[in-house]
Image (tube, rainbow, N blue to C red):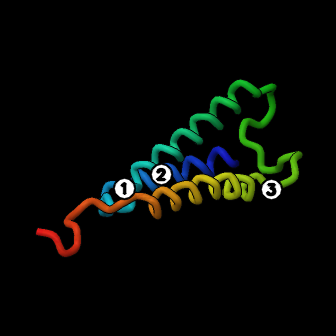
């Protein structure tokens, strides 16, 4: 399910990227989410040993796969927030001509 969660986030951000102003740097967030989705898909394909391809429960510390997908999105969103905070907006400098 963490694959599905990440794919939904990537599709949603890509769709929003087309309509929102570019100052939010949604292109960077979209690329990070699509990269994560592709990595998870490759991991699923390589590690597939039969049975269910999309699992609802995991054997790790977080047993719910949907919650695991949301937790996996948090570092991406934090990194995107840091990029937004540290980037300088393009435009006119205040007080200049």
Q: State which tag comes first along the sequence, 3 or 2.
A: 2
Question: Residue 20 location, x and y as percent?
Answer: 32, 63
Which marked residue is nearer to the observer: mark 3 or mark 2?
A: 2
Name the mark on residue 64. Answer: 3
Q: Residue furthest left?
A: 97
Q: Residue at x 32, y 62 (%)?
A: 89
Residue 44 in the image: above or below residue 59: above
Q: Residue at x 27, y 59 (%)?
A: 90
Marks 1 and 3, how far apart in space? 30 Å
Q: Which residue is mark 2?
A: 29
Name the mark on residue 17. Answer: 1
Secondary element under disc 2, as helix, strand or loop, is helix
Secondary element under disc 3, as helix, strand or loop, is loop
Question: Residue 58 location, x and y as percent?
Answer: 84, 47
Report crowding for label 2: few under 14, some 14 to 19, many 20 or more residues within 10 A (C-alpha): many
Q: Is residue 17 left or right of residue 32?
A: left
Q: Quadrant of the C terminus?
A: bottom left
Q: Nearer the viewer, residue 37 or 91?
A: 91
Q: State which tag comes first along the sequence, 2 or 1.
A: 1
Q: Nearer the viewer, residue 43 or 82?
A: 82
Q: Quadrant of residue 91?
A: bottom left
Q: Is residue 11 left or right of residue 66?
A: left
Q: Residue at x 87, y 52 (%)?
A: 61
Residue 64 in the image: above or below residue 85: above
Question: Residue 53 location, x and y as percent?
Answer: 73, 36
Question: Residue 74 location, x and y as percent?
Answer: 64, 58
Report crowding for label 1: few under 14, some 14 to 19, many 20 or more residues within 10 A (C-alpha): some
Which marked residue is nearer to the observer: mark 2 or mark 1?
A: 2
Report crowding for label 3: few under 14, some 14 to 19, many 20 or more residues within 10 A (C-alpha): some
């Amino acid at each position: 399910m963490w694959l599905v969660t990440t794919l939904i986030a990537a599709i949603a951000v890509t769709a929003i990227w087309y309509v929102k102003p570019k100052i939010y740097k949604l292109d960077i967030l979209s690329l990070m989410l699509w990269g994560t989705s592709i990595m998870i898909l490759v991991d699923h394909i390589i590690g597939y040993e039969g049975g269910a391809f999309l699992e609802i429960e995991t054997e790790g510390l977080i047993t719910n796969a949907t919650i695991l997908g949301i937790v996996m999105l948090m570092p991406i969103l934090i990194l995107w927030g840091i990029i937004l905070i540290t980037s300088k907006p393009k435009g006119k400098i205040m007080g200049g001509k």
